[in-house]
Amino acid sequence: MPLQTYFRINAENAGQFERTLIIVDEGASVHYIEGCFTEGTQISTSDGLVAIEDITKESKVLTHKGIYKSVYHTQVRPYSGQLYTVVVTGQPSETIEATEEHPFLVVKRKYRKDRNKEWKSEWLPVKELKKGDYVCTPIDQTENIQDTLIYEVPVGNGRHGWQLEKLEIPCTTDLFKLIGYYLAEGSISAGSYLNFSFNSSEREYIEEVKKLFFTVFGETRVRESHHEKNNGINVVVSSVRLCRFFEQFGTHSSSKIMPEWVLQESSEKQAALVSTWYKGDGNYYRKQTKHGFKEMFRVSTTSRTLAFQGRMVLARLGIASSLNSQDRRSTQRQTMYNLVIGGEYMIPFGTIVDQPIQPQVWNKKRATPYFVDKNYLYAPVRSITSKTVENISVYNFSVTDDESYVADGVAVHNCTAPNFSSGSLHSAVVEIFVKKGARCQYTTVQNWYKNVYNLVTKRAYVEEEGQMIWTDFNMGSKVTMKYPGFILAGKGARGETLSMALAGAGQHQDTGSKAIHLAPYTSSTIISKSISKDGGRTSYRGLVSVGPNAHHSKNTVICDALLLDGQSRSDTYPVDKIFNSHVEVQHEATVSKIGDDQLFYLMSRGVTEENARKMIVNGFIEDLVRKLPLEYAVEMNRLIDHEMEGSIG
């Protein structure tokens, strides 16, 4: 059985320090890989919640910085190992499942019973989370305030084609009040009728909706439809154009949604929306129960997306809330999602909905386990469990610049390195013990921020008939110094390093490997590929040491470099220390560049220069890629393809 321990320290204004220890027991096999999420995980995008398996390169996702960024690569792969399930206080019906190394943005709990006083966040792998630690939900930082909303709607009967007509709509608090009423009570029927459903006792709301239609749209064709059977009144507007406009908010209750422009408007307008949404779908609960006194505001909806968005709008207004759901399938009804506002946050919410709230209850200040500031909503972990899974599909994706996203309401990293500060340091030590007859493969595909100094020590101790494989791909970073090594201490032990590095402008990738043969009949292979572009520098730095007792051992080193322009550089620094005459040691090194004849040949067949360069680079690394697990081969190719965009010499 493999044993693994890991810790990570994030130092403010400095960087990240990691320590990993893996022991692979006799006859066992382990493949150490990076983290991902399971199918169905909900990702916060500019179009609402989207399942992670449906994320594409066209998606824009909310990052840990509270801004929307584009996805440039998606990944799915099989996974076997420990799968962690996290339940967050305030959304117990939403569980988060992630592989053990996936980094979450968290604040460690300082007090067992009291809420934290300071809120300094850090990236931690999910397996290091503890009950009570706080996870971070980013608040959208974009503010896009409009005075006039220009909205195009298709008009016509379709027989002679549709035409787009521009509607100029005053983007006022009155418009947002009308949107709030629509989210609560609105629907569209037959594509032409805009309906708002009220109880006959809600005359005040009915009159306000009619007034808002006139104020915002100048619409006077508003009528009432009475239903004596259920004591209801429908406010109906017959207008194709207005139906087209309100379609963006969903046509029925479970599809309700707030578009991006609503989520990024001023706090004044959003508060107006919340006030009327609450009038339609909210209630004030105050009751003494056998478990104690309960007091809260609630807003209910059958739209999961709207519930999450409502929570984020409230966070922008400085109000923390919780989320729960009621499964009503037994009564053949849709799941109900409830936003709950309690504790001290009832006071500002009460101001918005015109329900005054006293700051104290039974002479005690109101309090909740949550906290909200201008950047994040913080909620404590309610529980965390793990289980062993076999060959399940897990998903991950890469995001422009920030390399992070929001999964089931929690900020997570995509497993490349977080950007801590200007000129930050990443320092790591990985130690692996491979017992007799065991096998270990450690695979890393890293795309670091370009201000990171990446200094890593990786070493493995391999016993008799054991096997150690390092698979390492490095790009990004200002400087990388990494030389995975293995000590072949047992008879017949084997070691292999597959290394790939790409250096761009201002970057130095100093990589290589160390093979130390101590026992007889041991073997090692080191395959290193490097690409330099835009003045970047790569170096191979290697050590092969064969001890006096390591007779009949074999070593092969293949070191290939590709220069994409005249300003780039590649160096090789091999060191061989041989203390036995009955061994085979080979070293092969080549340096090449993209030739004009290669470009001419491809471009004469209709290939653009940029694509021709990509094809040559892919051909250069093909023999190495073939040795990688499929999911990592795809990842490497796509990262290189992304880095090569615009590379015309």
Image (cartoon, rainbow, N blue to C red):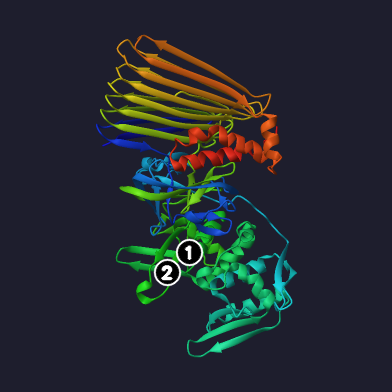
Q: Position of residue 235 (x, y in %)?
A: 60, 82
The residue at the point 58 percent across, 78 percent down is 196
Circle 2 residue: 335
Q: Position of residue 285 (x, y in %)?
A: 43, 68
**Farthest residue, direction bottom:** 228
Above or below for 634 versus 143: above
Q: Position of residue 599 (x, y in %)?
A: 68, 34
Q: Quadrant of residue 488?
A: top left
Does residue 385 appear in the picture of this structure?
no
Q: Quadrant of residue 264?
A: bottom right
Classify residue 598 as left or right of residue 314: right
Does residue 637 appear in the picture of this structure?
yes
Mark 2 residue crowding within 10 angstroms, few (<14) / some (14–19) / many (20+) = some
Q: Are marks 1 and 2 in contact (CB under 8 Å)?
A: yes
Circle 1 residue: 304
Mark 1 secondary-structure assignment? helix
State the residue in front, 184 or 628: 628
Mark 1 residue crowding within 10 angstroms, few (<14) / some (14–19) / many (20+) = many
Q: Position of residue 596 (x, y in %)?
A: 70, 30
Q: Quadrant of residue 223?
A: bottom right
